[in-house]
């Protein structure tokens, strides 16, 4: 079974049911499938076949759904990328993933045209629904890049942050994704007829599994929201479309919890809000359940390497501790181990390992890293957690130096590498600084070259903004004479974290 | 520079000052030259949640105002003129 089959079945069962609605248009399942087939035909005409990697840069849109399923229909592997990435980042992923085709918006296609470095010669396909909801497909920048052999069974390639700073790409097959989605859907108890508000990034594995695959397979209706997230837009959508389900990352949950006057909106249709991407603070969870008693807020835990979902605080007849992420899903085995890989008893903290049918095939072209991450069928998550006597899973921290901001994982090394390219910087370290809304924000500590005394914070931020997505741009830059180190070389990140946290908030208030 | 509430700025003047705040967050630096009151900050300039937050914070500091979460939605940023009007209203409130 392939991902496209999920859409085919829904279109066969409920052809006239709306598949996607947004401010400008509405598409039925039969129309969505017809447009997917039209785009798949175009993809095949530019030599898309099994093993071809196709980058999708489409934001949260109907066009994303068309591109996603068209690549599956044409037999290629989907490489979903954020439309917020800089050209440097896009080029790095296209190159790393050996992508030969890019599907994007007309506007982004113009931005890419002739500006990607030479090794990134790709065929650019633009897609856009016009004002009469007709799909316009354009093909430009024809540059045939031979598909790399192997990996013919890969359906999805998900970029993920690593501690080395080099982009890692998780490979998942149709079977891994569909088996994970099927169990998730079962545990959640979804039965169809839901209206799904889609504001978390559609290129994320969380959205791909918990929303795209789950709700397309159920024939549900998507309300896609593009652009920054505002609670008022969400409330308007619930009121006007009867939204019943959505998925949030913690900062969205925090905004929802503290919205001053939700009583002005009719939110009766909203039944479920799933929470993932990072841990939603228990205080926020309590506020949410007090303020919105008719809504079920469901903590879930997942990661790209696990084919997405690992545990869910569902089904709803069971009560879960509010700071847990529920129980591992059926078919997912979880172990908590010490540094010597020995199992720990209940309530002891250790690294979370897991085994499930959804575990990734591996990292693209990184067999050594794959071997380090998956050992004897057990995936090392890099997260620290514990299981209680009832089998509830708690996430406590992580073993890796990742920064988690607004549900996005960032590698500090990637930002450090960027800073080190600045001619005035001799040494750099980036840590996560605690933040009420975004959990953490990147904070940079830099050492200037003696000869470059004139380099300012603004110069550094401008330099970063061109090269890094905005959530990776440091929120504060601190100049030091030298970085604190443990022994001879390793940066003392704990010392820097303390320093960053003691500096006060980088911004005066918090918004989306 | 902070502006006292007594200064009455026109929409066009506010847009001009906003250009400086917007500049570091533009995906296309050239876009700064063609800013108008109709420019959509999200679809034309490609600002995401993080960038919007920084622009709002920058505007609060620049114009000496405070903007509440419930006053912001996509419509506020669908035209630079809308955002400028919100700033104008806030400046009058602080008079």
Image (tube, coloured by chain):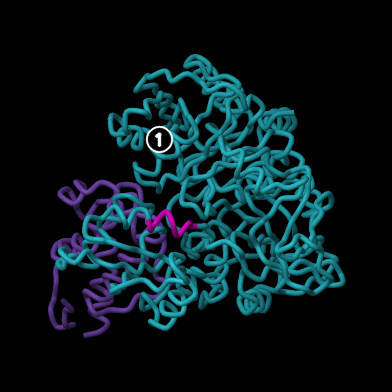
Q: So how many labels did they put on this image? A: 1
Main secondary structure along the magenta-highlighted residues: helix
Would residue A303 be seen by someone viewing this image from the given angle? yes
The residue indicated by pointer 1 is A105
Viewer-side residue, A12 vs A46: A46
Vertical relation: A319 (above or below) A342: below
Region rendered in magenta: A410-416
**Quadrant in the picture for residue A496:** bottom left
Can residue A244 be spotted in the picture? no
| Percent position of residue A488, x then y | 44, 67
Colour purple maps to chain: B
Shown colour of chain A: cyan
Q: Is residue A296 above or below residue A130?
A: below
Report which quarter residue A483 is drawn in: bottom left
Residue A494 placed where, x, y %?
49, 74
Seen from this angle, which residue lies furthest front? A488
């Amino acid at each position: 079974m392939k991902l496209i089959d999920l859409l085919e079945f829904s279109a066969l069962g409920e052809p006239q049911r709306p598949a996607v609605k947004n401010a400008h248009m509405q598409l039925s399942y039969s129309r969505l499938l017809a447009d997917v087939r039209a785009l798949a035909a175009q993809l095949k005409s530019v030599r898309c076949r099994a093993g071809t990697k196709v980058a999708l840069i489409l934001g949260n849109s109907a066009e994303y759904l068309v591109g996603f399923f068209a690549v599956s229909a044409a037999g290629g592997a989907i490489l979903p990328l954020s439309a917020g990435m800089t050209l440097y980042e896009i080029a790095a992923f296209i190159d790393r993933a050996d992508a030969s085709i890019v599907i994007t918006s007309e506007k982004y296609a113009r931005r890419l045209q002739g500006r990607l470095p030479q090794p990134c010669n790709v065929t650019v396909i633009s897609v856009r629904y016009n004002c009469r909801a007709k799909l316009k497909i354009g093909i430009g920048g024809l540059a045939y890049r031979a598909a790399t052999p192997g990996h013919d069974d890969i359906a999805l390639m998900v970029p993920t942050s690593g501690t080395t700073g080099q982009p890692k790409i998780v490979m998942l097959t149709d079977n891994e994704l569909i088996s994970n989605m099927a169990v998730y859907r079962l545990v959640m108890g979804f039965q169809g007829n839901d209206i799904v508000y889609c504001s978390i990034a559609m290129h994320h594995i969380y959205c791909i599994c918990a929303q795209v695959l789950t709700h397309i397979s159920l024939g549900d209706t998507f309300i896609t929201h593009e652009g920054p997230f505002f609670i008022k837009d969400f409330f308007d959508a619930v009121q006007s479309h009867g939204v019943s389900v959505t998925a949030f990352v913690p900062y969205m949950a925090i905004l929802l919890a503290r919205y001053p006057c939700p009583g002005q909106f009719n939110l009766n249709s909203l039944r479920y809000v799933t929470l993932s991407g990072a841990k939603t603070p228990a205080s926020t969870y309590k506020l949410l359940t007090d303020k919105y008693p008719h809504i079920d807020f469901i903590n879930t835990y997942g990661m790209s390497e696990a084919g997405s979902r690992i545990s869910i605080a569902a089904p709803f007849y069971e009560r879960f501790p509010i700071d847990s992420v529920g129980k591992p899903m059926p078919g997912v085995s979880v172990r908590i181990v010490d540094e010597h890989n020995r199992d720990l008893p209940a309530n002891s903290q250790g690294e979370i390992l897991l085994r499930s049918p959804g575990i990734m095939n591996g990292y693209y072209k990184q067999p050594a890293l794959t071997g380090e991450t998956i050992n004897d069928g057990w995936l090392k998550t890099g997260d620290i957690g514990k299981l209680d006597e009832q089998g509830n899973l708690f996430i406590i921290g992580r073993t890796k130096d990742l920064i988690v901001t607004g549900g996005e994982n960032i590698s500090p090394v990637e930002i450090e590498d960027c800073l080190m390219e600045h001619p005035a910087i001799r040494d750099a370290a980036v840590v996560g600084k605690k933040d009420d809304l975004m959990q953490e924000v990147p904070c940079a500590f830099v050492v200037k070259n003696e000869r470059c005394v004139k380099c300012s914070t603004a110069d550094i931020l401008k330099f970063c903004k061109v090269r890094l997505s905005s959530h990776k741009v440091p929120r504060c830059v601190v100049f030091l004479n030298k970085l604190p180190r443990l022994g001879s070389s390793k940066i003392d990140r704990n010392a820097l974290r303390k320093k960053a946290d003691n500096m006060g908030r980088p911004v005066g208030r918090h918004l989306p | 520079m902070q502006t006292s509430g007594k200064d009455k700025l026109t929409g066009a003047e506010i847009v001009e000052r906003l250009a400086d705040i917007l500049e570091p967050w533009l995906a296309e630096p050239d876009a700064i030259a063609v800013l108008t009151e109709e420019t959509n900050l999200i679809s034309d300039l490609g600002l995401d949640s993080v960038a919007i937050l920084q622009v709002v914070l920058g505007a609060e500091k620049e114009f000496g105002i405070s903007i509440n979460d419930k006053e912001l939605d996509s419509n506020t940023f669908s035209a630079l003129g809308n955002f400028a009007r919100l700033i104008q209203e806030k400046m009058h409130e602080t008079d």
